[in-house]
Amino acid sequence: MTTVAEKIRAIAAKAREASFAMAKLSTAAKNELLIDMALALVNNAEHIIAENRKDLEAGEKRGLSSAMLDRLMLDHSRINGMAEAIREVAALPDPVGEVTGMWKRPNDLMVGRMRIPLGVIGIIYESRPNVTSDAAALCLKSGNAVVLRGGSEAIHSNVAIAEICAQELKKRNIPEGALSLVPFPEREGVTEMLKQEEYIDVIIPRGGENLIRFVVEHSKIPVIKHYKGVCHIFVDASADFEMARNIIVNAKVQRPGVCNALETLLVHREIAPTFIPFIYDALSGLKVEVRGDEAFRQFAPQATAAVEEDWEAEYLDLILAAKVVDGLDGAIDHINRYCSLHTESIITGNYANAQRFIREVNSGVVMVNASTRFSDGNQLGLGAEIGISTTKLHSFGPMGLEDLTTRKFIVYGDGQIRP
């Protein structure tokens, strides 16, 4: 009987072999593949929904929350959305083969760098079955093979989606290993997948902090990490109050359970007496629990007293930490100490302060006069994203197609030899 370890090793080995074929596919061939994958999902929507219903029924028996069940649920509208996301990836420029610079050496050698696929990408994710098609599209368009391992709560949905997409590869004689999904839910599948450094080049986990820490702890393969999103907004003394309120409310309230939602508000001491009552009224009216430091609560005594743990908390809820700081230096110091390297924003009318904030804050996305909710691959013009990296190597911030490639050196000579 074949063990889980042997099954995973076979999947990874086939993916490595298929990656060589994927790297040679033309842009036109990849785009046609994706367009047909999108159509196949729509044409097989009833089958996907039927399989998804099995996951929903199992989830209800397991006592999954209504929010988790909503993330898990697929209907015709969501499947159409998945198909449209694949079409959007097909329409993006192909980064593979792009030469990002050429320069001449004194000996007349021409040296440049060319974008190439990473090879085999392993994606480990939870809950949302749309990640199956999104990740497949991004990895295939960038010339990679991909090994997908979704959560046990979505096993039937993920298998159905992956099999439908894989049929389109088969029609084109693309090796089946180019798109693989681990088809069994045992946790051992994850630990064995993380041992396949001979075949898998990088692991990208998508899910809660516990999953990502487990992957990092057990992986022999480089991991692109995103533990959590502790996002900040600093309201400078020169900020327009109406603009600040609109941005803060959007960043905190529009969708509080996502990683680019606002978690900590910093207010310049100079405007605290007037701005804090103004923003507290707006937030409390929207059922946001504000946890303020002593200086903040002088001007909003109804706020809950903040403790040290609040400054590094990712609430993913209608809860907001708030603090008064001594100007731009205080804001930058606080952010660089407590942030998770995700997204930070300054609300200001001062150009010099905006430029300093952009230069000196270390996070993957730094904004001026904009909501942190824009920290998203689609919103930033990447078309789609494989995830958001808070790791400075290999990529930093929202990751699009280009981030699923690396660069090799190319050299053109005319008979040169090294003296």
Image (cartoon, helix red, strand yellow):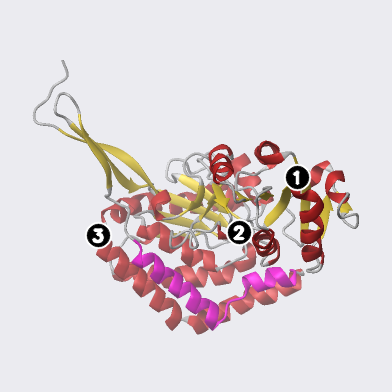
Q: Secondary structure at mark 1?
A: helix
Give the spatial CA distance, label 3 vs label 1.
58 Å
The residue carrying pointer 3 sits among few (fewer than 14), some (14 to 19) or many (20 or more) residues within 10 Å by Cα, namely some
In the rendered image, residue 88 lying in the magenta stretch gets the answer yes
Residue 108 relative to residue 232: left or right: left
Secondary structure of residue under mark 3: loop
From which residue to which does the magenta span run? 64-92
In the image, is 171 to the left or to the right of 55? left
Mark toward the start of the polypeptide (2 vs 1) = 1
Mark 2 vs 1: CB contact within 8 A: no
Amino acid type indicated by mark 2: Ser
Q: Position of residue 6 (x, y in %)?
A: 50, 50
Q: Which residue is mark 2?
A: 371
Q: Who's the residue at 46% across and 41% down the image? A: 394
Q: Amino acid at mark 1?
A: Glu
The residue lying toward the viewer, choosing from 340 and 274, is: 274
Residue 217 percent across, percent down from the top left = 63, 40
Q: Measured along the vertical axis of the image, is residue 353 above or below residue 92?
A: above
Q: Quadrant of residue 29?
A: bottom left
Circles 3 and 2: CB atoms closer than 8 Å: no
Foreground residue among 257 and 50: 257
Which residue in the rendered view is the most extreme toward the right? Answer: 301
Which secondary structure class fits the magenta region best? Answer: helix
Q: Position of residue 191 (x, y in %)?
A: 59, 47
Q: Is residue 181 magenta?
A: no
Residue 322, above or below 81: above
- Which residue is label 1 attached to? 270
As drawn, the label of residue 26 is: 3
**In this view of the protein, can residue 394 be seen by the observer?**
yes
Which-is-in-front pick, marks 3 and 2?
Answer: 2
> Which mark is first along the chain, 2 or 3?
3
Of all residues shown, which one is farthest toward the top?
Answer: 419
